[in-house]
Image (tube, grey):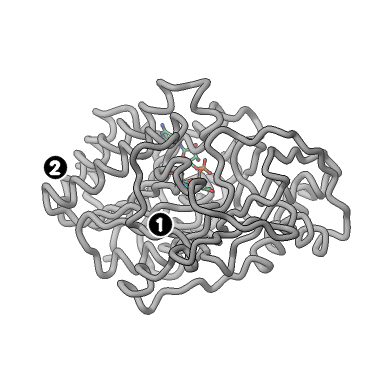
Amino acid sequence: MSKTLLVTGSSGLIGSEVCSYFSHELGYAVHGVDNNQRAVFFGPQGDTRWNQRRLQSTLKGFTHHELDIRDRAGVLALVREIRPEAIVHTAAQPSHDRAAAIPFDDFDTNAVGTLNLLEAARQACPESPFVNMSTNKVYGDAPNGIALREFETRWDFADPAYEHGIPETFSIDQSKHSLFGASKVAADVMVQEYGRYFGMPTCCLRGGCLTGPNHSGVELHGFLSYLVKCNLEGREYRVFGYKGKQVRDNIHAQDVARFMAAFIQAPRRGEVYNLGGGKQNSCSVLEAFAIAERFTGRRQVHTYVDQNRIGDHICYYSDLRKMRAHYPNWDIRVSLEETIRQIVEAWRTREDS
Ligand SMILES: NC(=O)c1ccc[n+]([C@@H]2O[C@H](COP(=O)([O-])OP(=O)(O)OC[C@H]3O[C@@H](n4cnc5c(N)ncnc54)[C@H](O)[C@@H]3O)[C@@H](O)[C@H]2O)c1
């Protein structure tokens, strides 16, 4: 009998990639939980039903559950019924800009929804690895306190202590997080606690910009996906502050799924990893324009808004050394260029169909 994986947020970018990877590559029977809440958070452009249908028609042994993770009784009952061999939790309100407008929905989904799942796992399957998608926003704007150097197209760390990027030991305390960052901190610490206090095999993956061809990027969430979409449609992309030189850490969803698989095969307790593409896969907004233009052959139409987004990082890329030390068989496989090429191709295909 095949092993069973429960994935929350299964119609989203990361969730759907995880469903495909574990089904195709590892032969898991996958149960997906998603209620298309992204369309409620972001409107029709955030709709993920197309992705749900894609999973239902392409994955063998995939079961979709139309469930809101805020529904505590529903979550407890489902996890008790399935008793999955592993849980990957990716359902979330993922935008820090959006959170300020919907603080209750944000906290109830990100913090309380995570607690519902953790407690359901503790009651039904405490030995099953539990992987939580966290975010680098748990560090708040503290990374902006690091001394920086300005280059022609990007900012970079001037302090040699961060030559490899931001490590997991960086403080998550006493900085501005946005309400989204704070609700994700609550979830992150709770996931660590279920590992430390109850001894469960849990981990938090503090992602940077996770992306790939299945991303339904919108202005407030989904950096490269939205940027490429604007480029292809000749739509104006708004750059918010920092001269467009703000550096983002990009990782392809497939490399995220591969790391999750590595953790599930050899889990540890209450761990934290900065899961990003590292310095090599980092780029500034201006640099992303240039790469997208190379693949689309179209100039990026953009305007500059001289006001950065609240809490936005000026420069962030992950130090990957802890992940590589704990899981030496894992490394980044998809380059930044290849990721952008795939996003261009995917938007073209989606728009043609
Ligand atoms: N994409 C990124 O750049 C990025 C960066 C850092 C961290 N993360 C984290 O990774 C995780 C996944 O992000 P993503 O980019 O795949 O987001 P996404 O919005 O594409 O996917 C999330 C999915 O969860 C579903 N969902 C939301 N609320 C729900 C609820 N209450 N009940 C059931 N389903 C619900 C949505 O409908 C959506 O399909 C999130 O925890 C996010 O904070 C993402």
Figure check: 68 above or below 297: above
Can you see residue 9? no
Q: The residue tagged with tag 2: helix, strand or loop?
A: helix
Which mark's residue is nearer the viewer, 1 or 2? 2
Looking at the image, is mark 1 or mark 2 earlier in the sequence?
Answer: 1
In the image: residue 14, left or right of residue 219: left
Q: Identity of the amino acid at label 2?
A: Gln
Q: Residue furthest bottom?
A: 329
In the image: residue 294, left or right of residue 15: right
Label annotation for residue 123: 2
Q: Residues within 10 Å of mark 1 (few under 14, many from 20)?
A: some
Rendered residue at 44%/35% (across/down): 177
Q: Identity of the amino acid at label 1?
A: Gly
Q: Give the quadrant of residue 47.
A: top right
In the image: residue 98, left or right of residue 1: right
Rendered residue at 44%/70% (across/down): 25
In the image: residue 132, left or right of residue 13: left
Decide which of 264, 245 is in the foreground and name it. Answer: 245
Mark 1 highlights which residue?
61
Rendered residue at 60%/49% (across/down): 215
